[in-house]
Image (cartoon, rainbow, N blue to C red):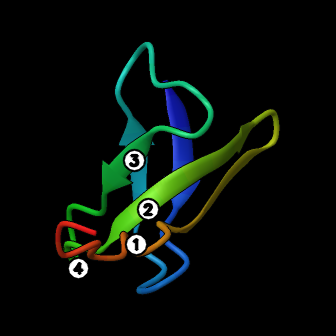
Amino acid sequence: MVEVICPECEAQFELEPGTEVHEIVVCPECGVELEVISLDPPQLDLAPMEEEDWGE
């Protein structure tokens, strides 16, 4: 298992087996969405916010 630290609340948790780079995961402590930036070394960043297109 790969252990990571949430950049928002600094909670330490493990990624699920098979997690890939650019995958979105949720911190089990604060609930923020995080993007897996790297697996070696393990690194997370806040997930990019999706913009609404309002049907345009």
For the point 44% across and 62% down, the residue is: 34
Indicate the secondary structure of the residue bearing disc 3. Answer: strand
The amino acid type of the residue labelled 3 equals Ile
Q: Quadrant of the C terminus?
A: bottom left
- Quarter where residue 41 is shown: top right
Near mark 3 (Cα within 10 A), the count class, few <14, some 14-19 or many ≥20, is some
Question: Where is 27 relative to 37, above or below?
Answer: below
What residue is pinned by disc 4? 30
Instruction: Report x, y in % for residue 46.
Output: 51, 73
46 or 55: nearer the eye? 55
Indicate the secondary structure of the residue bearing disc 1. Answer: loop
Indicate the secondary structure of the residue bearing disc 2. Answer: strand
Dot 3 or dot 1: first in sequence order is 1
Indicate the secondary structure of the residue bearing disc 4. Answer: loop
- Can you tell which mark lies on residue 11? 1
> In the image, is 52 to the left or to the right of 19?
left
What residue is pinned by disc 3? 24
Dot 1 or dot 2: first in sequence order is 1
For the point 39% across and 47% down, the residue is: 24
The amino acid type of the residue labelled 1 equals Ala
What residue is pinned by disc 2? 34
CB atoms at circles 2 and 3 under 8 Å apart? yes
For the point 18% across and 75% down, the residue is: 54
The residues tagged by marks 4 and 3 sit, at their Cα atoms, a distance apart of 15 Å
The amino acid type of the residue labelled 4 equals Cys
Near mark 4 (Cα within 10 A), the count class, few <14, some 14-19 or many ≥20, is few
CB atoms at circles 1 and 4 under 8 Å apart? yes
Q: Which of the two marks, 1 or 4, is nearer to us in this view?
A: 4
Q: Which of the two marks, 4 or 3, is nearer to us in this view?
A: 3
Near mark 2 (Cα within 10 A), the count class, few <14, some 14-19 or many ≥20, is many
> In the image, is 34 to the left or to the right of 40?
left
The residues tagged by marks 1 and 4 sit, at their Cα atoms, a distance apart of 8 Å
